[in-house]
Amino acid sequence: MDNVPAADLARRPDEVAAMFDDVADRYDLTNDVLALGQTRLWRRAVVNAVDPLPGDRVLDLAAGTGTSSSPLARRGARVIPCDFSLGMLSVGARRDPSLAFVAGDALRLPFADDAFDSVTISFGLRNTLDPVAALTEMRRVTRPGGRLVVCEFSHPTWAPMRTVYTEYLMRSLPSVARRLASEPEAYVYLAESIRAWPDQPALSGLIRTAGWSSVAWLNLTGGIVALHRAINPASSPPAPAPAPAPAPA
């Protein structure tokens, strides 16, 4: 990979936040180039999946500079962009002062129970230390009947595309990032975290484990990205029934 060292995927949350702080200024531009312009399509898909009514309370988690939040606000939602990278939030606040950016950790969200009608996270779930705990915390702050939308890199459904995509991730992406970004190692980390991320059915299972129901996904760009959707059930799922006692001998 052009002699770029392998990334450490066992980073602490503060280390990941610092990494995003370092790339905040050029993060959106670099992403648009590396994604070959597909980011706009993916953002539109997120907005359509959330489908907010005017006045709906929407939490946009891992919002970064707010590029995913602004389209939701334009649809009339009362959107709160939340991220653990202060550098990303600072850039976002300069670019769009109309958004109320909030610093927060996905594992300990600074919001009350049932505070939102919808919660969405784009390309951030895989950067959490414990995805199931993060999904459980997202469910806590979503009202019963509210929805979850997770937009995340996934696994292409066509085998030849998977081969080409993996080659791009692990070779071309770091090379391009070195010319565009101030911290190319951050993009090595991102590439390796994408490759190690669960596929569509496995992520659906994690979402169900966190207590969400009606889980479904939509493949975008041939499965390079998948949009997972779910509903917060009106009550917690029942506890598993105890195993029956053994019959007497």
Image (spheres, rainbow, N blue to C red):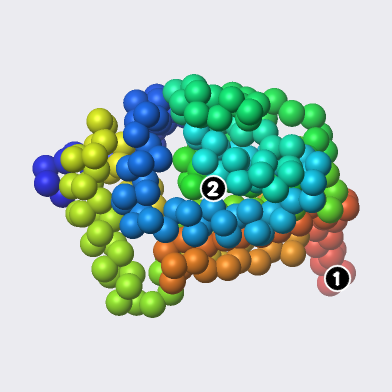
SS assignment at label 1? loop
Mark 2 closeness class: few <14, some 14–19, many ≥20 residues within 10 Å:
many
Which residue is drawn at the image coordinates 37% and 49% (left, top)?
32
The residue tagged 2 is 122
In front: mark 2 or mark 1? 2
Hey, which quadrant is residue 47 in on the image?
bottom right
Which residue is drawn at the image coordinates 48% and 54% (left, top)?
40
Q: Quadrant of the C terminus?
A: bottom right
Is 1 on the left-hand or right-hand side of 113?
Answer: left
Work out how far the residue at label 2 is from the one at label 1, CA to CA, in angstroms: 51 Å
One can see residue 239 in this view: no
Give, as a three-letter code, the residue at label 1.
Ala
Give, as a three-letter code, the residue at label 2.
Ser
Which residue is drawn at the image coordinates 42% and 58% (left, top)?
38
Where residue 102 appears, as percent x and y from the top left, is 62, 25
Circles 2 and 1 in contact, beta carbons < 8 Å: no
Going from N to C along the chain, the mark reached first, 2 or 1, is 2
Where residue 69 appears, as percent x and y from the top left, is 60, 40
Mark 1 closeness class: few <14, some 14–19, many ≥20 residues within 10 Å:
few
Hey, which quadrant is residue 165 in on the image?
bottom left
SS assignment at label 2? strand
Where residue 219 appears, as percent x and y from the top left, is 52, 68
Which residue is drawn at the image coordinates 60% and 55% (left, top)?
46
Picture disc at residue 109: none
Disc tally is: 2
The residue tagged 1 is 247
